[in-house]
Image: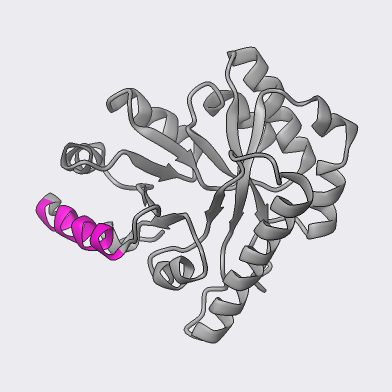
Amino acid sequence: MDTSEVIKRWREVKESLPVGVKLVAVSKHVPVEVIAALYRAGQRAFGENRVQELARKREALPGDVEWHMIGHLQTNKARVIVPFAAMIHGVDSARLLETIDREGARAGRVVPCLLQFRVASEESKFGMTLDEARELLESAAFARMKHARVAGVMSMATFTLDESRVREEFARSRELFETLKRDYFAGDPGFKELSMGMSGDYLLAVAAGSTLVRVGSALFRGDD
């Protein structure tokens, strides 16, 4: 992997993003030395979807890297990443959020989390429904949580060349974010993140209001 080309592509992506939109570089399967080169160029937020790979890379890279867990997180693996994860994007159940809260208490930190909604049609996509999110946010268990902080919403659009469909799904995600903000987090300035958009559709996501884009293949020429 040519690190100079990676850095060139990274700069192009960064320049395409408006102020206020954070780039999370999806570094799964990317060698540590390439991540280190991108870090030296100025990138700080990296996303991984496998706990073991994230933990291994964390040990090999500088301590101020922001590690984002962007994949499906199993409850039995939360303990590994809760002590250091900058954000957990894919919270798709009350049980997982409760586990993160418990492990956050054990680690002595508050963990920013995003509620993942399923807006795409593929069966492989994870995520809550709005009713499930309401049940969670109105529960006594959520009211007791002190170490898992809901910071926004995450979603993935359908993998398709139909841009109108992708726009509709991103609009739905924005609507879900605004509904939760209005009904549950109106007085919480920390509820502000809308994580959507990958290499093939991140500009559409930005146009729909994304604040975090998860870009991998556009940088590394692999899979997001």
Whether residue 23 sits left or right of residue 98 in the image: it is left
Taking depth in this image into account, of 138 and 223 the one nearest to the observer is: 138
Image quarter of residue 9: bottom left
In the rendered image, is residue 139 in sight?
yes
Percent position of residue 137, x then y: 81, 42
What color scheme is it? one colour
Q: Does residue 86 lie above or below 185 as drawn?
A: above
Percent position of residue 85, x then y: 49, 30
Q: State the quadrant of the C terminus.
A: bottom left
> Residue at 31% of width from left, 38% of height from top?
44
Residue span colored magenta = 4-16
Taking depth in this image into account, of 153 and 107 the one nearest to the observer is: 153
> Residue at 70% of width from left, 61% of height from top?
176
> Residue at 16% of width from left, 42% of height from top?
41
Q: Does residue 100 lie above or below 134 as drawn?
A: above
Image quarter of residue 48: top left
Whether residue 47 sits left or right of residue 41 in the image: it is right
In magenta stretch: residue 13? yes
Percent position of residue 193, x then y: 54, 49
Q: Does residue 52 lie above or below 13 as drawn?
A: above
In magenta stretch: residue 35? no
